[in-house]
Image: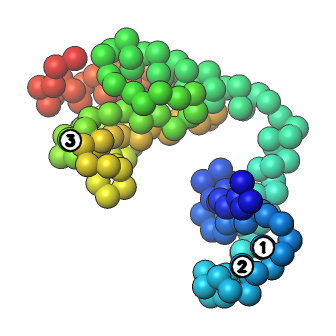
Amino acid sequence: MDIYTGTLGKALGGGTGGYVSSHRAIVQTLRQRARPYLFSNTLMPSAVAGALAALDLVETETERRERVGHHAARFRKLMVEAGFELLEGQHPIVPVMFHDAALAARVAEEMLLEGIYVVAFSYPVVPVGKARIRVQLSAAHSDTDVTRAVEAFITARRRLGMAP
């Protein structure tokens, strides 16, 4: 690859900024010619400070990373055992597949009635027929929270008359 582009907006919070990594001549050309660069603003100092603090935590602490990994693995295991379809992965953002946009939205509404906030995603955010609910686990959750979330999905499914 000659050019790498990306954003760490989700990983480091703030939701702003991106990067280009390449040979110096390519980066300089993009700085002079790329419309997004010409009309961009600098990052907010608070976003940069937050990102630096997050990187410091990643380098110096493992406990929270291990805890969120535990919660994600446990959530995945319990959801699969309960008969839910999940997208493969090991990260703490777990897509629970419903395929139908209206159904995913109704499940999210039922989850909120159970005190669990999740977001349904459908087209154009995801492909048609791939509607899902995205569950975001964190190190701040407990095993009880994870169990409660799974139970809320089961309750929502039952209320909506969905087969397990």
SS for callout 1: helix
Mark 1 → mark 3, Cα distance in angstroms: 43 Å
Mark 1 → mark 2, Cα distance in angstroms: 6 Å
Give the mark nearest the N terminus, 1 or 3.
Answer: 1
The residue that disc 3 covers is 100
Question: How many residues crowd around disc 1 within 10 Å: few (fewer than 14), some, or many (20 or more)?
Answer: few
Point out which mark residue 71 bears: none
In which quadrant is the N terminus drawn? Answer: bottom right
Residue 159 sits in quarter: top left
Question: Is residue 68 found left or right of 63 in the rendered image?
Answer: left
Q: Decide: is 155 above or below 3.
A: above
Give the mark nearest the N terminus, 3 or 2.
Answer: 2
The percent coordinates of residue 55 (x first, y second) are 81, 49
Tag 1–tag 2 contact (CB < 8 Å):
yes
SS for callout 3: loop
The residue that disc 2 covers is 30
The percent coordinates of residue 2 (x first, y second) are 74, 59
Residue 4 sits in quarter: bottom right
Evaluate whether residue 122 shows in this view.
no
In which quadrant is the C terminus drawn? Answer: top left
The percent coordinates of residue 155 (x first, y second) are 25, 24
Residue in the image at 25% along x and 38% along y: 99
Q: What amino acid does circle 3 point to?
A: Asp
Q: Decide: is 94 above or below 20.
A: above
Residue 114 sits in quarter: top left
The residue that disc 1 covers is 26
Q: Nearer the viewer, residue 107 or 16?
A: 16
